[in-house]
Amino acid sequence: MQHKTSTHHSLAKALEILMAFTPHNQEMGTVRLSERLGYHKSTVSRLLHVLMDYGFVRQNLESKKFVLGPSVIDLSSSIQESLNDNLTQIAKPFLDHLRDETGETVVLELVSGRSAVIAYIAEGGGPIRIKGRVGDRRPVHAAAGAKAILAFSGKEKRDRFLKGNLLGLTPNTITGQKRLEREMKEIRKRGFAIDNEEVNLGINAIGAPVYNHEGEPVAAAVIAGLSQKISWKGGSPLVALLKETAGKISAHLYYGGESSGGNGRKKKNSKK
């Protein structure tokens, strides 16, 4: 029992040493780490060398100070790969819950190539089904989810997707460049995008961005349904529930900024 307790304490101290390098990974020597953490210098030195053996820290041979090592990058890459591969599975329970709360169809939307792609559908319980299947593609300038993603992406990405001849699917589809630019600004201001019968007449949708750990929008949660039922006006409860859901998914992707789905970015501002 004593051995287990000692091992636990050593592991806890080693983890505290690693966390001491966040968020900027500045070089630190044994003395500074000892003073910062309140551990004896010999303890810090011993644990640093163990961490160095496993690649979690590396030492500058000239200054003799330490920084985080390549094994930390390997762990981070593994997490990122897992998040990318499992985005739909991570989002699914939150989207299902939103569907149950609202009774409306809820969709996870991605941007792939030059299209909005449906990655998951939680169908609502009403008698009328919304047309759409997993894998279906929609124009990015008309789909609510894709517009939410692009509005919070960098200007270069927005220009790449939204310039050129844009197809008008219905009389409501926005195809003019200046109007689309104004639309992007409005989306960033309110934190969500709308599809006002722009893809299919009689169908409205609202979409809120989902962010990854770097603060980049990688997907969108979308509520879609009959135009007389899906509203974003007058403090619609659907908007609040949608943004809350997008925020929860973002938190599970290790996003550390605002969780409301859209009024701020953690890492860098792309609203120019």
Image: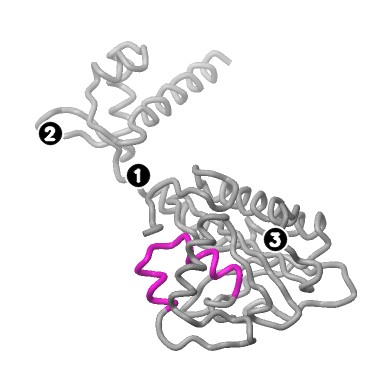
Q: Position of residue 148 (x, y in %)?
A: 55, 64
| Mark 2 surroundings within 10 Å by alpha-carbon count, few (fewer than 14), some (14 through 19), many (20 or more) | few
Q: Is residue 180 above or below residue 209?
A: below
Q: Amino acid at mark 3?
A: Trp
Q: Is residue 159 magenta?
A: yes
Question: Tell me, what colour scheme is on the image?
Answer: one colour
Could you tell me which residue is drawn at 49 percent across and 74 percent down? 179
- Residue bearing the label numbered 2: 61
Furthest residue toward right: 127
> Which circle, 2 or 3, is nearer the viewer?
3
| 1 or 3: tag closer to the N-terminus | 1
Q: Which residues are magenta?
A: 143-162
Instruction: Give the spatial CA distance, label 2 vs label 3.
Output: 60 Å
Instruction: Give the spatial CA distance, label 1 vs label 3.
Output: 46 Å
Mark 1: secondary structure: helix
Q: Are marks 1 and 2 in contact (CB under 8 Å)?
A: no
| Mark 3 surroundings within 10 Å by alpha-carbon count, few (fewer than 14), some (14 through 19), many (20 or more) | some
> Which circle, 1 or 3, is nearer the viewer?
3
Q: Is residue 188 above or below residue 49?
A: below
Q: Is residue 267 left or right of residue 89?
A: left
Please name whichever residue, 243 or 124, is drawn nearer the observer in this view of the structure: 243
Please name whichever residue, 74 or 88, is drawn nearer the observer in this view of the structure: 88
Q: Position of residue 67 (x, y in %)?
A: 26, 35
Q: Is residue 230 left or right of residue 86?
A: right
Q: Position of residue 109 (x, y in %)?
A: 60, 69
Mark drawn on residue 232 = 3
Instruction: Give the spatial CA distance, label 1 vs label 2.
Output: 19 Å
From the image, give the main secondary structure of the stretch colored magenta.
helix
- Residue bearing the label numbered 1: 71
Could you tell me which residue is drawn at 36 percent across and 59 percent down? 272
